[in-house]
Amino acid sequence: MKWLIKNGTIASEEKTFLADLLLEDDKIIKIDTNIEDAEAKCIDAEGCYVMPGAVDIHTHMDLDVGIARAIDDFYTGTIAAACGGTTTIIDHMAFGPKGCNLMHQVKEYHKLADHNAVVDYGFHGVFQHVNDDILKEMKKVVKDEGITSFKIYMTYDYKLSDEDIVRVLKQAKEDGILITVHCENDGIVSYFRKKFVGEGKTEVRYHPLSRPNEAEAEAVNRMLYLASAIGDAPVYIVHLSTKEGLEEIRQAKKRGQKHIGVETCPQYLLLTDDLYDDSSEGLKAVMAPPLRKPADNEALWDGLKNNEIDTVATDHCPFTFKRQKQQGADDFTKCPSGAPGVEERLSLLYSEGVCKGKISMEQLVKYACTNPAKVGGVYPQKGTLSVGSDADIVIFDPKKKWTMTKKKMYGAADYTCYEGREIEGKIDLVMQRGKILVKDGEFLGERGDGKYLKRGKSSIV
């Protein structure tokens, strides 16, 4: 089948320009002005941006955190993604049983995602422990599954020691694999959490105090030096939240490190830790790292404006407020950590970023579409409007205004952290591989429409 999208403003990572777009089956076959094709079904995009389907390379669908399980599975969560203009996700897998190999969770996640996801998807592998067999297995997972990135944690129960991190980085560099990292100093976090609980300071306002800026900055600094020590191994810092963490990245780049990727999220650009002042509502925003100060918001926006940050992902990990988040009502350390975000991201970046002059339209496309595809190893199949690329399309009307509210959203969580926020610009239509997924806010896709993506090397490697 052919589609002809006419009269729209093409938005790429480099420029915006008036042009038509011709799609055949699942691919883009022509980009030009005044295209005519009698066989094609026409969509008039006059006055709208036509942009690539967004790519979110940090989600947690169906995540089991031990004390709770994320309320969005790969069906409801990817419907939310589609309705938010995201047509590709790369999901971070949960930890498996103690001592399991790398493939254990890959198999489990195929069971969760295959025949359920409505957008295209891939997985990041995850490390829980390190030995010679695990290190050898990395290359096999890349070959068999097309999983070209693995995550390590510097905190939580399965945190890796510095020595094990070095071993992973050395092997990853040899094999052309990207290592993504949750950077928080476990000693700092553990000390403050125990201290506050011991003193009876269990209200949610102590959550950000238990994970201070220094915990992130120290871990970022240490991670980058570890990577440098074995010859600039490729690393990708997930969910950067602090001005101090960004400064550590700047310093590493000044020292000459080149294989560094950096991600932030809308919550760290737009929300602040004053949300924790409300002992009940603050539970909605319990996440790790926590929300920060306005100065951190400003620093991260500057990092985006100056092209010092590579991507804006979501860390989508939703729980219900009325039930699951209430586990932390009397003790913030017992609240499941995470919040919804995959449906909100694109609209927030346009309304709060482009409309307010903090980033350009081209930068929005770069951070939400093109760079994530490059980092994730799915470019140019995804993340760009180019001849031969998948026909993943978002038609976005900048003139429409609406109010963000849970009542208008598809995710399974019972809240959004942006309730009542006035939004400029609205998604009119979303296509995935030439098929309409969303039109005028209505989801039209089917369970299992999403395809598993075997990925290539990351651009950071």
Image (cartoon, rainbow, N blue to C red):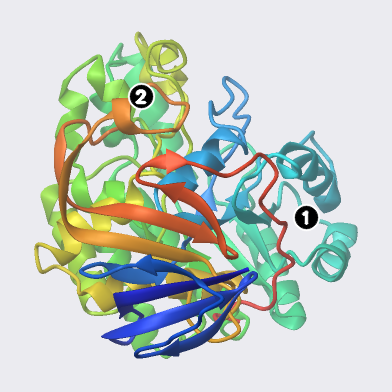
Which quarter of the picture shows residue 148?
A: bottom right
Secondary structure, mark 2, is: helix
Secondary structure, mark 1, is: loop
* Badge 2 density bin: few <14, some 14–19, many ≥20, Cα 10 Å: few
Of residues 277 and 228, the one drawn nearer to the viewer in this rendering: 277
Which circle, 1 or 2, is nearer the viewer?
A: 1
Which of the two labelled residues, at mark 1 and mark 2, occupies the earlier sequence position? 1
Q: Amino acid at mark 1?
A: Val
Of residues 274 and 167, the one drawn nearer to the viewer in this rendering: 274
Residue of label 2:
195
Let me know if residue 58 appears in the view. yes
Instruction: From the top left corner, tell me how far across and down residue 162 is, in percent.
Output: 61, 60
Residue of label 1:
130
User: Where, quadrant-wise, is the C terminus in this rendering?
Assistant: bottom right
The vertical placement of 98 against 40, above or below, is above
Q: Amino acid at mark 2?
A: Lys
Instruction: From the top left corner, tell me how far across and down residue 131 is, in percent.
Output: 84, 57
Cα distance between the residues tagged 1 and 2:
31 Å
User: Where, quadrant-wise, is the N terminus in this rendering?
Assistant: bottom right
**Residue ID at (70%, 76%):** 456
Which quarter of the picture shows residue 13?
A: bottom left
Instruction: From the top left corner, tell me how far across and down residue 331 is, in percent.
Output: 37, 14
Let me know if residue 261 appears in the view. no
Of residues 18 and 226, the one drawn nearer to the viewer in this rendering: 18
**Residue ID at (71%, 52%):** 127
The vertical placement of 86 against 326, above or below, is below
State left or right for residue 104 relative to residue 83.
right
* Badge 1 density bin: few <14, some 14–19, many ≥20, Cα 10 Å: some
**Residue ID at (43%, 33%):** 410
